[in-house]
Image (cartoon, rainbow, N blue to C red):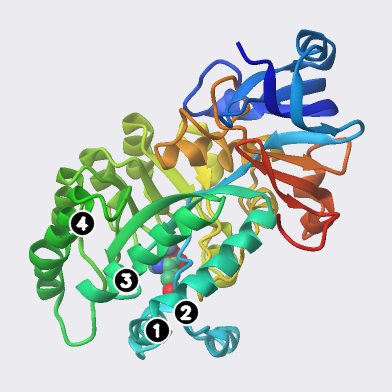
Amino acid sequence: MSNSYRLLVKNAQQVVLICSDGEKYLTKLGMQNLSVIENGSIVIGSDGLIKAVGPAETVNAEFSEATFDKVIDASGMCVLPGLVDAHTHPVWAGDRVHEFAMKLAGATYMDVHRAGGGIHFTVERTRAAAASDLLTSLSGRLVRMLRAGTTLVECKSGYGLELQTELKMLQVIEEARRTLPINISSTYCGAHAVPKGKTVAEATEDILQVQLPRLREQMSAGTLRVDNIDVFCERGVFDLDSTRSILQAGKELGLNINFHGDELHPMNSAQLGAELGALAISHLEEVTDEGITSMAEAKTAAVLLPTTAYILRLPQPRARDMLEAGMIVALGSDFNPNAYCCSMPIVMHLACVNMRMSMPEALAAATINAAYALGRAHTHGSLEVGKHGDLLVLNTTRWEHLIYQLGGHQELIRYVVIKGDVVHDNDKTSDL
Ligand SMILES: N=CN[C@@H](CCC(=O)O)C(=O)O
Ligand SMILES: [Zn+2]
């Protein structure tokens, strides 16, 4: 048997495993008591998977005869799993900085949307953009996320709202998946808004009869890989019935249900998602008590998006009530032209301060629970033997600094590692 490995990270002051018993998600006490090893080492094999993680003394002795492509001496540093961003809209052309000014002056999200701005503004520019330009801007955004510690990110389509542009966006995501080291979970979000000139019924019909069948063809031909289906279930966008029929059709295609619900109005999206076996529902600023109970029972993850509530000055999602009800709480950056944030450390900070989560809860929500929301908890979200060797090495002796130092992640994150390869070294000027 070969005795050579890809990477040894040794003698870290702390190795934050998150969990150590194959858990697929954490709730309640599990989120408060993360598994942390003081003075630990970790070995990643040539296949990119974790071979050993434990006390430095034990691991160093067990691998004393082994050779490694790279050794990182992490003395005085912390190791933690790569962060997982469970909700982003990163493929688009045309920023919306002018709308930020409108919102600061008092316009609501729906005021802007109804006036033809918001998603519609981005749709026009994204339809007109060349795929190569979309790929260039997407790649830049994903590299920014990677430098901020994200190693697995969900990426949605949804600024096309018709077949050609939705496919163009999904193909761009597919190309990024093939060319960049960051792990991607791809989401078809053709029901992100009702296109101008169409009714909800017409838009739903187009998705069911035109868009989803073409998606099915491309997926079976192996030219496109799509993991999740999403709908913006909201008053004035997709109602409960149209949401149900689109999500059900996506499920029949083998996609995981992962949608926007109960954001601006209580829509009973949570109950619908639980009924359909959704893996995750995002936003939930307006979820009801019944919605919380249904999602907790159905093990549907709540993907909370602190940047959106912050930027739009919405009521904060009721994270404490959700956690107390035993819900699986995850976090996402919601990166989009309305909420321009690539940083999960900032998201965790906002979740702690504005949603009253503790730092261990926020880290669990941005690792194992976010991986669960994307159906990837068996491979990502914690540092356990057999999982992907995706990790961060921090220039600090306690991991909590990553959340505590608001906006400090540029200095704190020394290395980002994916499958045992160093993909970002903060001491070097460019990404490797
Ligand atoms: N709420 C719907 N979708 C996005 C916003 C997208 C946009 O405004 O472009 C969200 O999750 O916040
Ligand atoms: Zn969104």
Q: In the displayed image of the protein, which residue is found farthest to the right?
A: 76
406 to the left or right of 92: right
Q: Position of residue 241 (x, y in %)?
A: 14, 58
Residue at image position (54%, 64%) is 309
Badge number at residue 168: 3
How packed mark 1 is, by other alpha carbons closer than 10 Å (few <14, some 14-19, many 20 or more), is some
Question: Closer to the N terminus: mark 2 or mark 4?
Answer: 2
Along the viewing direction, whichever of 217 and 269 lies nearer the viewer: 217
Along the viewing direction, whichever of 6 and 391 lies nearer the viewer: 6
Q: Amino acid at mark 1?
A: Ala
Question: Closer to the N terminus: mark 1 or mark 3?
Answer: 1
Residue position for label 2:
133
How packed mark 2 is, by other alpha carbons closer than 10 Å (few <14, some 14-19, many 20 or more), is some
Q: Amino acid at mark 2?
A: Asp
SS class, disc 2: helix
Q: CA distance from mark 2 to mark 4?
A: 22 Å
> Contact, CB < 8 Å: mark 2 with mark 1?
yes
